[in-house]
Amino acid sequence: MRDPLAKQVVELKPSGIRKFFDLVAEMPEAISLGVGEPDFDTPWHIRDEGIYSLEKGRTFYTSNAGLKELKQEICNYIKRKLDITYNYNSDVIVTVGGSEAIDIALRAMINPGEGEEVLIPQPSYVSYEPCAILAGAKPVIIELKNENEFRLTAKELEDAITDKTKILILPFPNNPTGAIMERKDLEAIAEVIEKHDLFVISDEIYSELSYNEEHVSIACIPGMKERTILINGFSKAYAMTGWRLGYACGPENIITQMVKIHQFAIMCAPTTSQYAAVEALRNGDEDVREMREAYNQRRRFLMHSFKEMGLDCFEPFGAFYVFPCIKEFGMTSEEFATRFLNEEKVAVVPGTAFGDCGEGFLRISYAYSLENLKVAIGRLQRFVEKLRAEKQ
């Protein structure tokens, strides 16, 4: 019998995060700091709108590209937050989470078999590289550096570009590092992007979780809007992970082709979720502010704790992750995370789950209550002291 499987799928590595989720599932007494999911419930007024949409019998397909009212509110939101103007009728698509938007953007822009390259700064979200491969592109990794606070520099970008480079993935605020890009950083790389006639897929799913200053999109930089697919969603800002709803905004010619793929593979995003998302965008700013303040309190607690225990960690100003360095212990990230789980019953994610350059680091999520964080960090301090004593 011939092999029924696609070689490019078989050769994909499974997510490095999954292993630790599975291990924690076998340890009901363990504390997990591994999941990138808000610990808040979706605010009631948003849930109510979803319930009301069901009660009203709004259970049919929407337009392939999304509910008109939602696309209008997305455009209003982006204008209000970023001062960028999009046409709801031609420049916006509503997707099943931000992950679908990443996938169909790449598939709409890459010509398989032509060797086109996608630049992927790492450490970063686990989906970018496999999605690029499945779209028929060659992923090219740019290793971000701790000494640069894991920001992408213009030089790093310039050095990675070849005559086959087509797209840059821009994953900021960043998962797993919490790194952000300020306007000056974006202006510097925008010059390189224009010089080499590149396009950008800017994943801004954590844009509302910026703690130092207001988030800036590369689409705000002159000359970049027409080169950028801006991706965002409702999972992180509004605690709506299970509603599976995201969106992409960009040039009409690219969005049109994304809609084509979406309509054949998905049809449309969930109708109930779309009505709930309209309410989120219209009346959810205060919810976002309250959740952001809670995350920031936890962030500050973790940074203070790391300083007290002498654990090296640059201060991240975005998302809800910290990325401490554990190189002093002479262990791999996976060895550290495995021992920590087995000995102290706390789960964290090895930095290598987000790219090889994550070696020597851990991702710790603070999308958990301050009470749980205090217990987990107490165990981390005890574990770190034990490891240091072993080295003596």
Image (cartoon, grey):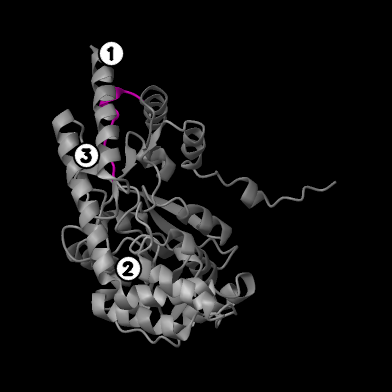
Q: How far apart are the two marked residues, 3 and 2, measured between alpha carbons?
A: 30 Å
Residue 91 visible: no
- Residue identified by numbered label 2: 193
Looking at this view, name the residue that lies furthest to the right: 1
Q: Earlier in the sequence, mark 3 or mark 2?
A: 2
Q: Which residues are magenta?
A: 322-331
Instruction: Give the number of the disc on residue 390.
Output: 1
Q: How far apart are the two marked residues, 3 and 1, measured between alpha carbons?
A: 22 Å
- Identity of the residue drawn at 24% across and 29% down: 378
Q: Residues within 10 Å of mark 3 (few under 14, many from 20)?
A: many
Q: Residues within 10 Å of mark 1 (few under 14, many from 20)?
A: few
Q: Is residue 113 above or below residue 91?
A: above
Residue 266 visible: yes
Q: Is residue 324 magenta?
A: yes
- Residue identified by numbered label 3: 313
Q: Is residue 267 above or below residue 202?
A: below
Give percent across and percent down for residue 311. Answer: 21, 32
Looking at this view, name the residue that lies furthest to the top: 392
Q: Earlier in the sequence, mark 3 or mark 1?
A: 3
Give percent across and percent down for residue 82. Answer: 25, 75
Label pair 3/1, CB-CB below 8 angstroms: no
Give percent across and percent down for residue 122. Answer: 37, 49
Q: Amino acid at mark 1?
A: Glu
For mark 2, give the secondary structure: helix
Q: Earlier in the sequence, mark 2 or mark 1?
A: 2
Give percent across and percent down for residue 291. Answer: 26, 58
Q: Amino acid at mark 3?
A: Cys
